[in-house]
Image (spheres, rainbow, N blue to C red):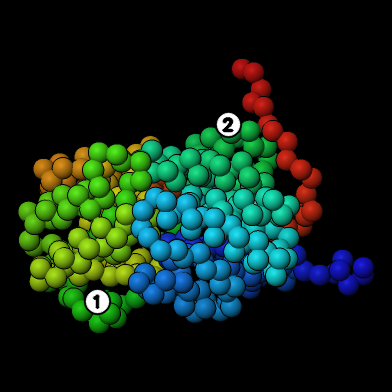
Amino acid sequence: MAELSLRKKRLVFVSSTRADWGLLSPLARALRDTAPELDVAVVATNMHLLPEYGMTVDEIRADGFSPFCADMSVPGADEASRVRALAKCTAAMADAFTVLEPDAVVLLGDRYEILGVASAAALMNIPILHIAGGEISEGAVDDSIRHAVTKLSTLHLTATEQYRQRVIQLGEEPSRVINTGAIGVWNAINQPKLPASVLEAFLGIPLYEEPVAVITYHPATLDSQASPAARVRMMLDALDDFPELYCVITYPNNDARSDGIISEIERFAAGRPNAIAVKSLGMRRYLSLLSYADICIGNSSSGIVEVPSFHIPTVDIGIRQRGRIAAKSVVHCGDSREEISAAIRHALSPEMARLLPSVENPYFKPDTLGMQVRAVRDFAASLPCAPKKFYDIPDL
């Protein structure tokens, strides 16, 4: 029993995509390097283990971790296949947690597989620390999943005060909901950038001869009006109105029907001399590219959360991110070619250029990483914790 009481508290970070590891990795590394009372482990699943999406588990290994790999791949790219993948993920997490014996699990965001991770942890009585709750993205099923994960979690680190209040509104104890700002913004400001020559060699493009657009388009999973392939085709048609733009297009997440998006962007890149499709840039290359880019286009949350800190405009297309707090540099538009083209033209206008230097990012806090590290260490020190109680907002 004495040996058991002296065992370090084990935190298990679960990551399923290139994007969430880019956000989780600074916290995981900081805790590993500065919190001697903690044992930090990582579980890699979903896109990290898929060669067709860049086998990004290697990025976790490059950060000095030896991840437990939990395969959740299943055949198919439709909605039913995602349900089967979710079930496989839940089972794989039961195996991972049995082996790793975490005292707490750290999760970020709102993807469907994160619901499987949170369900497994909750049923195994493992407290969950959830990052980026309380947000809104009306065009994706992720919106409901995010709130469901909130209710399964014990500690919450939100990106803005409005999001903190929304988590409290869901019945979470205010003392366990902390507004730290967005870790992605901390990355954008603090991550050392690669020299232009290194990026040019990787991408095979010149960064200064033409204006550069960084483009990411994911399925809007609650869009019942058109297929993801049809939607992205309208965006690509709009890009043809700007032949001077050098288009760097990253692959979408592996949501339902993302295969149609990949086919369309590969076709576009093959037919346009100044366009390339990239499976995964990784956090450092992605943020470095944004520091040289002229515009961000698509429907990724990064265009709303991180990109404003680079003082370049974002064109946010369609309903996927509808409801998120956004800086003044974000131009929202519909899905048609005409709407997208008009939004890009406005984003590249002299009027926008005059606005950009003074843009403030609503997701910024000066010490986000430090706040998160302190919150996690305090939470770990309190373990094991008492069962949650529903917090009723006092009558006004």
Q: Is residue 317 left or right of residue 125?
A: left
Crowding at label 2, few (<14), some or many (≥20) Cα neighbours within 10 Å?
some
Q: Is residue 5 left or right of residue 390?
A: right
Q: Can residue 193 be seen in this view?
A: no
Q: Which of 67/32 is in front?
A: 67
Secondary structure of the residue carrying numbered label 1:
helix
**What label does residue 52 carry, if any?**
none
What amino acid is found at the position of numbered circle 2 in the picture?
Gln
Can you say which quadrant of the picture contains the C terminus?
A: top right
The residue that disc 2 covers is: 169
Q: How far apart are marks 2 and 1 (CA)?
A: 45 Å
Secondary structure of the residue carrying numbered label 2:
helix
User: Residue at position x 17%, y 53% from top?
Assistant: 233
User: Residue at position x 40%, y 63% from top?
Assistant: 75
Crowding at label 1, few (<14), some or many (≥20) Cα neighbours within 10 Å?
some
User: Residue at position x 51%, y 74% from top?
Assistant: 60
Residue 246 x %, y %: 15, 66
**What label does residue 203 carry, if any?**
1
Can you say which quadrant of the picture contains the N terminus?
A: bottom right
What amino acid is found at the position of numbered circle 1 in the picture?
Leu
Q: Is residue 229 left or right of residue 386?
A: left
Residue positioned most to the top: 396
